[in-house]
C-alpha cells in the first residue's frame, strides 16, 4: 500500500483487478468498513511499495470511523501503525535516503495521510 498525502483514493478503486491489493475502506462515516480490491501500481518517484505484515488500528482511527473527528477525508483506510517489508522502490529524486533496499523491514507510525 502507498502512503500518499493529497491523492484521492477513489481513483484507485477499480475492482475486479489482477493481483489486487486488499484493504478495509471507510467510504462513509459511521458505516462498516468494506473489503476492497485496489488496483496495484508501480511506486512513483520517492515512493515505496510495502508488503504489510501487520497493521495496528488505534483509538484515533476508531474516532474517524465513528464520525467523532472534525472534517475527516473519506474514503480512507484506517490504520497507520504498519510493519512490513519493502517490495518495490520508485525512482530516487531529491533527498530520499539511498539506504532503502528491498526486502528491508520497516515500521511506519504516522497520522494525517491517506492510503492509496
Image (spheres, rainbow, N blue to C red):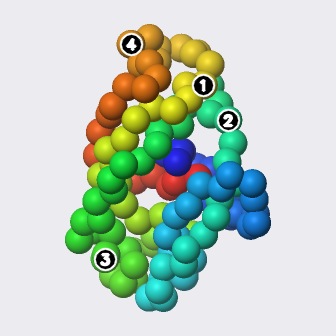
Choose the circle earlier in sequence order: 2 or 4: 2
Q: Circles 1 and 2: CB distance less than 8 Å?
A: yes
Label disc, if present, on residue 67 of the rendered structure? none
Q: CA gap, disc 4 to disc 1? A: 13 Å
Choose top left, top right, bottom left or bottom right for residue 14: bottom right
Residue 45 placement, left or right of 84: right
Q: Is residue 5 visible?
A: no
Q: CA gap, disc 3 to disc 4? A: 36 Å
Q: Please, what secondary structure does the residue beneath circle 4 have?
A: loop
Choose the circle earlier in sequence order: 4 or 1: 1
Choose the circle earlier in sequence order: 1 or 2: 2
Residue 104 placement, left or right of 9: left
x and y percentages locating residue 111 in the rendered image = 34, 52
Viewer-nearest of discs 3 and 4: 4
Q: CA gap, disc 3 to disc 1? A: 33 Å
Pick the front one: 71 or 75: 75
Q: Identify whether 87 is placed above or below 38.
A: above
Choose the circle earlier in sequence order: 3 or 1: 3
Can you identify the residue that label 4 sits on?
A: 99
Label disc, if present, on residue 90 of the rendered structure? 1
Choose the circle earlier in sequence order: 3 or 2: 2
Q: Please, what secondary structure does the residue beneath circle 3 have?
A: helix
Q: CA gap, disc 3 to disc 2? A: 32 Å
Residue at figure coordinates x 32%, y 34% from the top left: 106
Choose top left, top right, bottom left or bottom right for residue 85: top left
Can you identify the residue that label 3 sits on?
A: 63
Choose the circle earlier in sequence order: 3 or 4: 3
Label disc, if present, on residue 42 of the rendered structure? 2
**Few, some or many residues within 10 Å of mark 2 (<14, 14–19, 20+):** few
Viewer-nearest of discs 3 and 2: 2
Q: Identify whether 105 is placed above or below 9.
A: above
Amino acid at each position: 500500500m502507498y502512503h500518499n498525502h493529497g491523492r484521492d483514493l477513489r481513483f484507485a478503486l477499480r475492482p475486479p483487478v489482477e493481483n489486487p491489493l486488499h484493504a478495509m475502506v471507510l467510504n462513509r462515516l459511521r458505516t462498516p468498513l468494506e473489503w476492497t480490491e485496489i488496483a496495484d501500481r508501480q511506486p512513483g518517484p520517492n515512493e515505496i511499495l510495502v508488503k504489510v505484515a501487520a497493521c495496528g488500528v488505534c483509538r484515533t482511527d476508531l474516532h474517524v470511523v465513528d464520525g467523532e473527528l472534525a472534517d475527516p477525508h473519506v474514503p480512507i483506510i484506517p490504520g497507520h501503525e504498519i510493519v512490513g517489508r519493502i517490495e518495490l522502490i520508485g525512482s530516487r529524486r531529491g533527498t530520499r535516503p539511498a539506504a532503502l533496499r528491498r526486502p528491508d523491514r520497516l515500521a511506519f507510525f504516522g497520522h494525517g495521510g491517506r492510503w492509496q
